[in-house]
Image: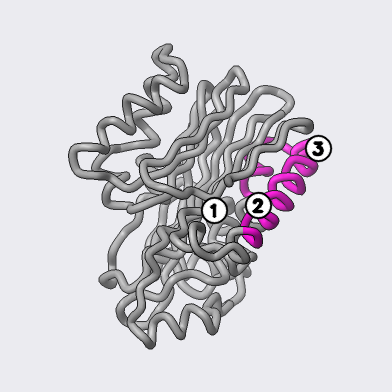
Amino acid sequence: MKIIIHGGFFSESSTDDSMKKAKQEAVTAIVKDAYNYLQNHSAVETVVYAVSLLEDNPLFNAGTGSQIQSDGKIRMSAAIMDGETQKMSGVINIEDVKNPVFVAEKLIQVDDRILGGEGAIQFARQHNFEAFLTETPERRAEYEKKLASKGQGTVGCVAIDAEGKIAVATSTGGKGFEMVGRISDSATVAGNYANAFCGLSCTGVGEDIVSNATAAKIVTRVTDGMPIADAFAKTFDELKPYDGFAGAVAIDAQGNIFHQDSHPSMVFASFDGENLEVFQ
């Protein structure tokens, strides 16, 4: 059983020691909590749980603390994928819910598994997800001053359980100040993908990740027999012609944990019960 999480990118890591320390402590606590949860739960249940903890922490750009779009509203996206059943579900540009990943989890039970906008909100209300304001004073101040954060924010988790089953979940509050209707990579197979061989969650600039089909490419290459490190290297090389901004975390069926980013610094932590790795 192993788990890896990420909390997006942030530019303040090189200049703000207090923020860096806070995020290191947060991902350390969350990855350990989620690993303990994994002891008695499936990979799918665990990735949802881990991402919900990340969504609830305003240090990260997902759920509470999500970025505000150009019209002053917050719209979030989230997805999960079960590597065993190959079912993916998600919400795109959902508003006023506390944990978009829980709505994505509910959708995996129905036929129309990816919903956007009003449809996603309506589904959430029909399934007793109450209205919740995810805006924080810090995000409102950024918006009112027209200061877009340089950090690219998304959160995610990949886990492999005791039965060797892999799952992934990803959630984002967007890039901030984007055009209304803009769709991120998080609820697409470019940003969130898993099968029996590998699971992967991305963060970064959604447009770059979609152009590169990052998650689907890496997982497919691992499925075809390429070592996970080589699959990452080849796929990240394909971002270079347009200076693509991306980071990814993954676990393969052999339990190999891997992570890489094209630009510093991705926030991440991994844990297998003994070995803890946290971004520096």
Badge 1: how crowded within 10 Å, few (<14), some, or many (20+)? many
- Give the structural element (helix, strand or loop) at label 1: strand
In the displayed structure, would residue 181 be above or below residue 198? below
Mark 3 or 1: in front is 1
- Give the structural element (helix, strand or loop) at label 3: loop
Tell me if label 1 and label 2 are in contact, CB under 8 Å: yes
User: Residue 4: x and y, percent?
Assistant: 61, 39
N-terminal of the pair, mark 1 or mark 2, is: 1
Amino acid under label 2?
A: Val
In the displayed structure, would residue 173 be above or below residue 231? below
N-terminal of the pair, mark 3 or mark 1, is: 1
Residue holding disc 3? 40
* Res 109 visible: no
Question: Magenta region: which residues?
Answer: 21-48
Residue holding disc 1? 7
Give whichever of 87, 241 is nearer the camera: 241
